[in-house]
Image: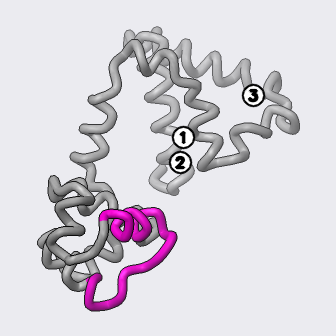
Amino acid sequence: MRLGSSLYHARKKSGLSQENVAEKLGVSRQTISKWETDETLPDIRQSKRLAVLYRMTLDELIEYDFDEQQAQQMIDSVSEEMQAKIDWNKVWSKKYPVLATYHEKVRIQDYAPPLREMLTQLRVDYGYNHTDAMLVLKDILARVWKGEM
């Protein structure tokens, strides 16, 4: 994760605004914004003050990342109706560009029948609905990919 993103998320977790942080550090709000967008970097003294302000070590601040609870809160904050409107392939393609282009190379028709069979089998054997069967199959694939199975 970029330092600016770490600073932004640590500030948000602390419940402080850019104005609050700027006031406590004696800098402008624009300075805080520039740090959080990686336009500029805080010096080591300011970084240490940020860590103290956010109740973290400097190492934690530099390596700060979402924890599972924060991720869950973000997921829960998006309504079912809004989730249905989101083009998830487009969203994930920004992080994983292969998702936007693989269909031009991969012969999907070769993979579709066995995958459809596996989805059907999960629905029949365990009574999963279509979405749950897809999620179970995705999880199994992830475990195989990680070498857990």
Residue 111's tag is 3
Nearer-N-terminus badge (3/1)? 3
Label 3: few (<14), some or many (≥20) within 10 Å? few
The answer to whether the residues at label 3 and label 1 have Cβ atoms under 8 Å apart is no
Q: Do the residues labelled 1 and 2 touch (CB within 8 Å)?
A: yes
Report, in whole angstroms, how far the alpha carbon at label 1 lies from the one at label 2: 5 Å
Q: Along the line of sight, which residue is nearer the eye, 6 or 40?
A: 40
Residue 96 bears which disc, if any?
Answer: none
- Residue that label 2 marks: 144
Provide the residue span drawn in magenta: 29-47
> Mark on residue 141?
1
Q: Quadrant of residue 132?
A: top left
Whole-percent x, y for residue 34 in the image: 43, 67
Which comes before the other along the chain, label 2 or label 3? Answer: 3
Q: What residue type is labelled 3?
A: Tyr
Viewer-proximal residue among 45 and 69: 45
Distance from Cα at disc 3 to Cα at disc 1: 14 Å
Residue at image position (48%, 38%) is 140
Q: Is residue 91 left or right of residue 19?
A: right
> For the stretch drawn in magenta, what is the main secondary structure?
helix
Q: In this view, does 41 lie above or below 112?
A: below
Residue 31: in magenta span: yes
